[in-house]
Image (cartoon, helix red, strand yellow):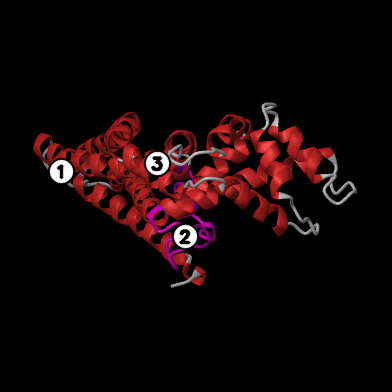
Amino acid sequence: MGSQFWWFYDIVAAAVFLVCIFLAGKKGVLRGAIAAVGCVIALALALGISTGAADGVYQNTMRSSNIKKVAKVIRQDVFLYKYAAYLESLDANIDPSYDRLDAIFSSENKNYDEQLSKYINNINGRRLYDDEETLRVVHEGYAVVIGELVSQSMNKYAAEVAMKEIRKNPETMQELIPMIHFREEGESVPPAKFITDNYTAPAYVTIYKLAGLLIVFILAFVFTLYMSYSIASKQEPSRPVEYIISGSTGIFTGAAIVFIIAAAVRLWAVLGSNEMLFFNNEVIDRSLIFKYFYNLVSKL
């Protein structure tokens, strides 16, 4: 399946709403209301528990192994060589000097942004960019280099998140560069911890959050259905207005279920690094209804 099948998501969303409205209409006002309220409470409970527990679960499970993975790919001068390769890849005919970059990264003056900006704009004896663009090029280099290191040790989603975090807070690199540009072997753990805690942790917290949301909601939803059938007896509406009232309660149930389906799709897309043929953002963005639920989930 490709992007031309975006309508599949809207059909699923519409089908969920219609089924929930139909079933709520058949249940009666009381059962439908209990199910709808319970479903909303189940969703709120799942969001609260998954959000509150995700970081703690990550810290006690994946963090230590992620540090080891990153430490394995951080070798002596790896940041230097990768940053030089980044400069060479720019459309500016830049031929970087390893010795000059080494001097910058080893400097006691830790204003690396300023030093790199001056170097880039004098590397060919001419000014290549204005000040704002030069700083953007410097920061993008940080993101590209760290993103490559993370992609070698973790999944591509973690690399994308790491690059996003660096672009958002490039000043954090002023603290990382002295650690990652080390002189002796065996000094790779401190920069690995820094990268894991500051750049890749949000990716894994999101994964745990989505997984927890699905698990808690399913359990709470099953309990809600059980309670709705235990507390209230089935009373099929006898008048059209009662069908409308009881059926309308199914809208809330349907919205909660579609939200959870969106969370499942988001988790699948994240684990597949947004490269899967059907479970990717390009397909979902073309949908008419489902994308709004997916966008809400993406903000978690």
Q: Residues within 10 Å of mark 3 (few under 14, many from 20)?
A: many
**Between marks 1 and 2, how big is the CA–CA gap?**
43 Å
Q: Point out which mark residue 235 bears.
A: 1
**Between marks 3 and 1, how big is the CA–CA gap?**
42 Å
Query: Is 33 rendered above or below residue 156?
Result: above
* Magenta stretch encompasses residue 272: yes
Q: Earlier in the sequence, mark 3 or mark 2?
A: 3
Q: Earlier in the sequence, mark 3 or mark 1?
A: 3
Q: Residue 158: x percent and y percent?
A: 45, 48
Relative side of 24 to 47, left or right: left
Q: Residue furthest right?
A: 126
Quadrant where the C terminus is found in the figure: top left
Q: Residue 113: x percent and y percent?
A: 71, 35
Q: Earlier in the sequence, mark 1 or mark 2?
A: 1
Residue range corresponding to the magenta coloring: 270-296
- The secondary element bearing badge 3 is classed as helix
**Between marks 3 and 2, how big is the CA–CA gap?**
16 Å
**Residue linked to disc 2:** 280
Q: Given this view, does label 1 or label 2 mark the residue nearer the observer?
A: 2
